[in-house]
Amino acid sequence: MRSGSLFLFILLSSVLIKAQDLNPVSWTFSLEKSGDSLYLVHADARIEPHWKLYSHFIEEGGPIPTDLYIDSLPGLRQMADIEEEGKRHGPDKDPIFGIDVSYYMNKVRFTRKVYVAAHPAIIKGYVLFMVCNDEQCLPPRTIPFELTP
């Protein structure tokens, strides 16, 4: 009986540890000069097969939309809304949330314009996102970044 309980405990522990390590999106961040004082902050996502990364443009009541935040620093101003570049799917009725959502699979680039009046040492921020597949959704995550103009 004791060895059966130990086996069950080890089995369940390994499943929980594996679920915690699940990270189906990898991010890279870059900075592109767009004018005298304008920069484009790019957040590129690579998404593992069968996972959906949600668009920034989603109505309330659904998954967490992907957002690219720029920290407020002296001499730095965020311009315009986020732009998305990739093969957008939807809007489709999401089976988990029951509303129409748009999402990306494989890869997508999120871009935000930044006006730099006085060159700070760094541009800092983070991306907030949520992913789901046909069986589960992972909790929202934030990935910080720092870029030098």
Image (tube, rainbow, N blue to C red):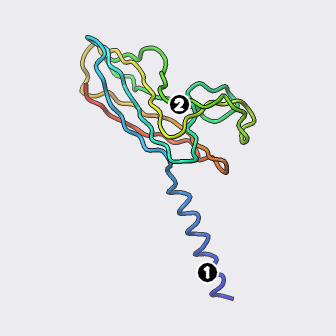
Residue assigned mark 1: 7
Q: Is residue 72 left or right of residue 60?
A: left
Tell me where residue 1 sits by quadrant. bottom right
Using the image as rendered, state which of residue 134 and residue 141 is in the foreground: 134
Disc on res. 87: 2
Going by the numbered disc 1, the residue's amino acid type is: Phe
Circle 1 SS class: helix
Q: Are marks 1 and 2 in contact (CB under 8 Å)?
A: no
Q: Position of residue 78 (x, y in %)?
A: 41, 17
Q: Position of residue 81 (x, y in %)?
A: 49, 18
Using the image as rendered, state which of residue 86 and residue 121 is in the foreground: 86
Tell me where residue 64 sits by quadrant. top right
Going by the numbered disc 2, the residue's amino acid type is: Lys
Q: Residues within 10 Å of mark 1 (few under 14, many from 20)?
A: few
- Image: 11 above or below 84: below
Estimate the spatial distance between the alpha carbons at disc 1 and disc 2, rounded to whole Å.
Answer: 45 Å
- Image: 96 above or below 109: below
